[in-house]
Image: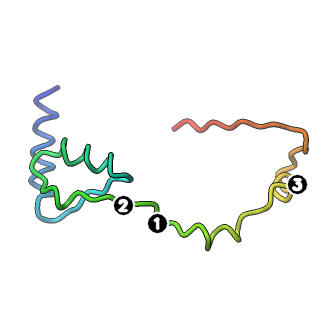
Amino acid sequence: MKTLNFRRKILLALLMKKNMYLAGVSNAVRDDLRQSSFGIPKEQIMTLYNCIDMEKIEMAFYSRQTARTQLNILRISFYLAHSVD
C-alpha cells in the first residue's frame, strides 16, 4: 500500500509540476500541502481565501422569522442539523 501511495505521489508531481497550481483554504493548509507535496514547486501552492462577498449576498438572506414561517417551524422549536457525506 505504501508503494502505491508513493507511486501516486510521483505521478501527481510529474503531471502537476508545470501546468497546475494547488490552493489551500488557509495558510496552515497551504503549508501542509507544501510540506507533503513531493516535487511540486512551493510557488505553485498558494492560499485561496474565501472568495464570497458577504455584503453582496447578505441581502438575499431571509430574516429568521421569514425563514421559520416558510419552513413551517414553530417559534419555540429548536432544531439541530447534521450533514453526513
**What colouring does the structure picture have?**
rainbow
Residue 17 percent coordinates (x, y): 11, 58
Give me the C-alpha separation between circle 3 and circle 1. Answer: 31 Å
Residue sticking out furthest to the bottom: 56
Q: Left of 26 or right of it: where is 74? A: right
Quadrant (top left, top right, bottom left, bottom right) of the N terminus: top left
Q: Nearer the viewer, residue 50 or 85?
A: 50
Whether pointer 2 and pointer 1 mark residues with C-beta atoms closer than 8 Å, the reply is: yes
Q: Amino acid at mark 1?
A: Cys
Q: How many marks?
A: 3
Q: Crowding near pointer 1: few (<14 within 10 Å), some, many (20+)?
A: few
Give me the C-alpha separation between circle 2 and circle 3. Answer: 37 Å
Kind of element beneath mark 2: loop
Kind of element beneath mark 3: helix
At 9% from the left edge and 53% from the top edge, which residue is drawn?
14
Q: Left of 85 or right of it: where is 9? A: left
Whether pointer 3 and pointer 1 mark residues with C-beta atoms closer than 8 Å, the reply is: no
State the residue position of label 1: 51
Whether pointer 2 and pointer 3 mark residues with C-beta atoms closer than 8 Å, the reply is: no
Q: Amino acid at mark 3?
A: Thr
Residue 34 percent coordinates (x, y): 20, 48
At 18% from the left edge and 43% from the top edge, which residue is drawn?
35
State the residue position of label 3: 69
Residue 75 percent coordinates (x, y): 90, 45
Is residue 42 positioned above or below 31 on the image? below
State the residue position of label 2: 48
Residue sticking out furthest to the top: 1
At 9% from the left edge and 50% from the top edge, which residue is drawn?
39
Residue 45 percent coordinates (x, y): 23, 57
